[in-house]
């Protein structure tokens, strides 16, 4: 029972991290981003299907664990394709020496000397890169959980129904 709860928890974490990845990579569909995008689409569908069909997932735990291991390899390939974004600088912080404050009837107003500029596309790619690494770890955890949750042939409950019939040998 605790294994099923842990499996569901980790699968929900996978879904939560896959959906933003889909949204962020959808707008930037290039060759290097397409691997992680396609893997994220397939992994989201797989994670949702295995959560909804938990009982059959437990019955075929070795197969589901194998598919999870395949997704780990696919996520590694997707993260490898986005490796250039790891060293990118997506933000620029600048401080202007000029600072002005105006006092009038409405109060004090002024211009801030500090500016933070963020490149949105770069930040989304960097977040997708991080989510890809996180999903490698999450799919590894669910794969190992499934190996421990698998049912052996001896674990299945066998019900034997015995019935006895009595026949009367009346001579009628």
Image: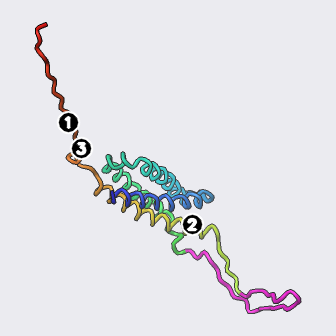
- Nearer the N terminus, badge 2 or badge 1? 2
Q: Which residue is mark 1?
A: 160
Is mark 3 in CB contact (under 8 Å) with mark 1? no
* Residue 108 falls within the magenta-colored stretch: yes
Task: From the viewer's perspective, tell me whether residue 30 is left or right of residue 110.
Answer: left
Measuring from the top left, give residue 70's x and y in whole percent: 38, 54
Distance from disc 2 to disc 3, alpha carbons, whole Å, reads 50 Å
Residue 84 vs residue 153: left or right? Answer: right
Residue at 36 percent across and 48 percent down: it is 57
Q: Residue at x 59, y 70 (%)?
A: 123
The stretch in magenta equals 88-113
Q: Earlier in the sequence, mark 2 or mark 3?
A: 2
Instruction: Give the spatial CA distance, label 3 vs label 1.
Output: 10 Å
Secondary structure of residue under mark 2: helix
Let me know if residue 107 is in the magenta part: yes
Residue denoted by label 3: 157
Residue annotated with mark 2: 125
Judged left or right of residue 82, residue 108 is right
Give residue 68's position: percent from left, percent from top: 38, 55
Which residue in the rendered view is the most extreme toward the right? Answer: 105
Front residue of 155 and 120: 155
Quadrant of the frame with the C terminus: top left
Q: Nearer the viewer, mark 2 or mark 3?
A: 3
Can the viewer see residue 73?
Answer: no
What's the residue at 85%, 92% (across, down)?
A: 103
In this view, the residue farthest toward the top is 172
- Marks 2 & 3, CB-CB < 8 Å contact: no
Colour pattern of the rendering: rainbow
Q: Residue 171, image x and y in percent?
A: 10, 8
């Amino acid at each position: 029972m605790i294994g099923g709860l842990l499996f569901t928890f980790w699968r929900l974490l996978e879904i939560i991290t896959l959906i933003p990845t889909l949204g962020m990579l959808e707008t930037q569909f290039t060759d290097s981003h397409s691997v992680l995008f396609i893997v994220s689409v397939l992994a989201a569908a797989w994670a949702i299907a295995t959560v909804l069909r938990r009982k059959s997932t437990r019955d075929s735990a070795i197969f589901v664990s194998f598919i999870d291991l395949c997704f780990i390899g696919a996520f590694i390939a997707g993260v490898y394709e986005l490796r250039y974004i790891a060293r990118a600088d997506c933000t620029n912080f600048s401080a202007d020496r000029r600072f002005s404050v105006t006092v009038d009837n409405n109060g004090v107003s002024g211009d801030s000397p500090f500016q933070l500029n963020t490149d949105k596309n770069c930040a989304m790619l960097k977040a997708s890169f991080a989510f890809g690494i996180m999903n490698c770890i999450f799919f590894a955890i669910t794969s190992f959980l499934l190996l421990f949750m698998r049912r052996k042939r001896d674990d299945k409950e066998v019900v034997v129904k015995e019935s006895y019939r009595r026949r009367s040998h009346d001579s009628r």
